[in-house]
Amino acid sequence: MLTMMIYAVCGTLSAVGLLFAYRSMRRRRFAAGLRTTALALLPMGLAMTGVIRFVLNMTINPIAWMGFGVLGMSVLLVLIARLVDARSGGRAEEAPAEGRRAAEAAPAAPELPSAGRKSKPPAKGAGGEDFSDIEAILKKHGI
C-alpha cells in the first residue's frame, strides 16, 4: 500500500515537472527546460531506488530521531569547545593568572599636560635615555 502511494505521488510530481519543462522548451528556453527536466525526474528516480521508502521508514521511527538529537548535541558540544578554546587562546587555566600579573605589572600612565600650558622639557637624565641628537635636529628646523 505504501509503495503504491509513493509511486503515485512521485509520478504526479514528475509529470507536472515534465509539463513545465515542455512548456519552457517550446518558448525556446532550452537550458531552463533541461534543468526543469532534470529536477522533474528526481522524484521518480528516488522512488524507484527505494530512497523515499527508507526516508519514510526512518521518519516514523522515534529511535532514529533520538539518534539525530544525539548527533546534533555532539556537533554542538564540539562547536562550543572550539569557541571556548579560541577565546582563551588554548590556555584555560593560565589565562586568568596572566591577566592579573599583567595588571599588577603595568605602570600607571603618566598624566598628559593640558593643551593651554607648555610643559617643561624633561631632564636629560630623567629617563636614562639620551635625546641630544633628536633635540639637535629639532633646533636645526626651528622647532
Image (spheres, helix red, strand yellow):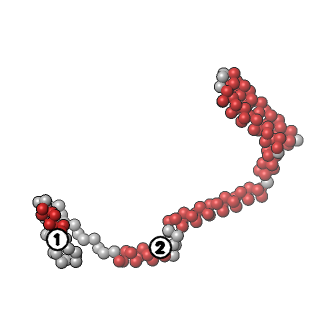
* Mark 1 neighbour density, 10 Å: few (under 14) some (14–19) many (20 or more): few
Q: Is residue 49 left or right of residue 83?
A: right
Placement of 75 over or under 57, stated as above or below: below
Q: Residue 33: horizontal and vertical position, in percent?
A: 69, 29
Q: At 79% from the left edge and 44% from the top edge, which residue is drawn?
A: 52
| Secondary structure of the residue carrying numbered label 1 | helix
Which of the pair 106/57 is nearer the observer? Answer: 106
User: For the image shown, how many numbered marks are present on the structure?
Assistant: 2
Q: Is residue 138 visible?
A: yes
Kind of residue at badge 2: Ala
Q: Which label was assigned to residue 132?
A: 1
Q: At 12% from the left edge and 62% from the top edge, which residue is drawn?
A: 140
Placement of 90 over or under 21, stated as above or below: below
Q: Which label was assigned to residue 45?
A: none
Q: Is residue 127 left or right of residue 78?
A: left
Q: Residue 137: horizontal and vertical position, in percent?
A: 16, 64
Q: At 66% from the left edge and 58% from the top edge, which residue is drawn?
A: 72
Alpha carbons under labels 1 and 2: distance apart: 42 Å
Kind of residue at badge 1: Ser
Q: Residue 143: horizontal and vertical position, in percent?
A: 13, 60
Q: Is residue 123 left or right of residue 103?
A: left
User: Which quadrant is the N terminus positioned in?
Assistant: top right
Q: Residue 37: horizontal and vertical position, in percent?
A: 72, 32
Could you tell me if the residues under marks 1 and 2 are in contact, i.e. CB atoms within 8 Å?
A: no
Which of the pair 140/16 is nearer the observer? Answer: 140
Which residue was labeled with disc 2?
95
